Image (spheres, rainbow, N blue to C red):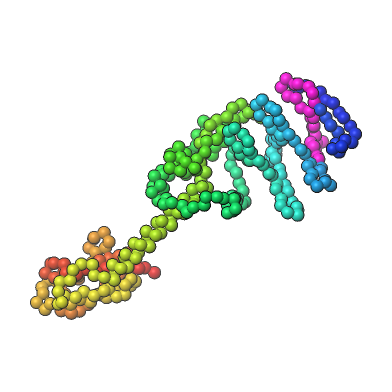
């Protein structure tokens, strides 16, 4: 199955090594330097294949592992947990009670010709907290975001399902997803898209890599916030215009003998009062009320002289309404009022 050749050197060296094991053989398939098996006598026992301790120095390593020079790939530490009765943990890291900082697992990935990831996970990742570096001292060329509404309107949000049953080499989720197609997003926000090389394993052996386009959804959050801020400016401007129109007559006045007051109160909750004045010789005078879509919702007929009408706004949905005084079938004056609920 494998060949093993060892040379054991004992004693204390200058680096304080008690034992150095050198494997100079070249196995055909596997060439382990040390093989350790720990088999429990019963299922209630605790078995430890290797137990190490590093203590007392300024820097301590329980295990220091290095894999280098491989023609295909190198794995310094390989962890596998299988056939557990309840839970399997391939690699368990814990750091506690340090005087400064604790890092349960610390990974670095750099210097590769393709993709570099400090951690790469083929499957879901759960975390009880997550932070990204955003300190001002780490950044340069800080500028306010440009207008984003127009760019966001070019995006096509989609729902989809992954080809989890077809692409067995990557563990994709089966449930319904929401997001973007990376190639489409790349045309609008190329900085949010990256091509990666996904490693494909057969067992524990790396056989190839698959090019995949991935999306950094986190980077789109500031873009969305900028778009919301732009929308809020538009909303505030429209609200200002509505308020200005609500305090003015928005069409012509027929003459000094025709009068139509502002609706009071405005906005109205349960009711609002509108005063009017019509020439004594005028015939067929009325007040008509329309919603914002131009649909007539109320009409008050047979108006005479100087008087008022009381509009029961309880009968109207919340919104903006236009009321018009017509004399002899012709529009004379129009105003607006708002119905507010609550």
The reply to whether the magenta stretch includes residue 139 is no
At a point 89% along the width and 32% down the height, the residue shown is: 10
At a point 13% along the width and 67% down the height, the residue shown is: 330
Instruction: Out of 292 and 244, give the one closest to the viewer.
Output: 244
Measuring from the top left, give residue 127's x and y in whole percent.
61, 48
Position of 218 relative to 301 (above/below): above
The extreme top residue here reads 28
The image quarter in which residue 53 lies: top right
Position of 287 relative to 227 (above/below): below
The reply to whether the magenta stretch includes residue 39 is yes
Instruction: Out of 290 and 60, give the one closest to the viewer.
Output: 60
At a point 58% along the width and 33% down the height, the residue shown is: 114
Residue 43 visible within the image:
no
Quadrant containing the N terminus in the rendered view:
top right
* Span colored in magenta: 23-52
**Magenta stretch, overall SS:** loop
Measuring from the top left, give residue 186's x and y in whole percent.
45, 40
Left or right for 6, reference 205: right
Quadrant containing the C terminus in the rendered view:
bottom left
Position of 119 relative to 73 (above/below): below
Residue 219 visible within the image:
yes
Measuring from the top left, give residue 172's x and y in whole percent.
54, 37
Left or right for 236, reference 112: left
């Amino acid at each position: 199955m494998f060949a093993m050749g060892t040379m054991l050197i004992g004693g204390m060296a200058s680096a304080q090594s008690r034992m150095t094991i050198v494997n100079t053989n070249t196995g055909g398939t596997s060439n382990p330097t040390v093989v350790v098996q720990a088999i429990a006598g019963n299922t209630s026992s605790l078995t430890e294949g290797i137990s190490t301790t590093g203590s007392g120095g300024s820097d301590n390593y329980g295990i220091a592992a290095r894999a280098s020079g491989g023609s295909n790939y190198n794995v310094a530490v390989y962890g596998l947990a299988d056939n557990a009765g309840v839970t399997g943990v391939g690699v368990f890291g814990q750091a506690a009670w340090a005087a400064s900082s604790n890092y349960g697992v610390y990974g670095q990935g750099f210097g590769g010709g393709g993709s570099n990831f400090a951690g790469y996970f083929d499957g879901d990742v759960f975390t009880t907290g997550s932070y990204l570096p955003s300190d001002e001292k780490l950044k340069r060329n800080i500028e306010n975001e440009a207008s984003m509404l127009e760019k966001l309107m070019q995006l096509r949000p989609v729902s989809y399902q992954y080809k989890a049953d077809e692409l067995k080499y990557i563990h994709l989720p089966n449930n319904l997803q929401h997001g973007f197609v990376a190639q489409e997003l790349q045309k609008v926000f190329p900085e949010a898209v990256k091509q990666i090389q996904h490693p494909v394993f057969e067992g524990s052996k790396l056989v190839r890599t698959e090019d995949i386009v991935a999306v950094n959804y986190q980077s789109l959050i500031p873009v969305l916030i900028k778009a919301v801020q732009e929308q809020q400016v538009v909303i505030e401007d429209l609200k200002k215009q509505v308020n200005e129109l609500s305090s003015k007559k928005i069409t012509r006045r027929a003459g000094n003998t025709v009068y139509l007051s502002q609706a009071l109160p405005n906005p109205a909750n349960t009711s609002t009062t509108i005063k009017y004045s019509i020439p004594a010789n005028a015939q067929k005078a009325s007040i008509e009320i329309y919603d914002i879509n131009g649909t007539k919702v109320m009409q008050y007929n047979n108006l005479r002289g100087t008087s008022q009408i009381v509009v029961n706004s309880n009968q109207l949905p919340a919104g903006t309404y236009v009321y018009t005084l017509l004399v002899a079938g012709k529009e004379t004056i129009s105003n607006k009022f708002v119905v507010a609920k609550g």
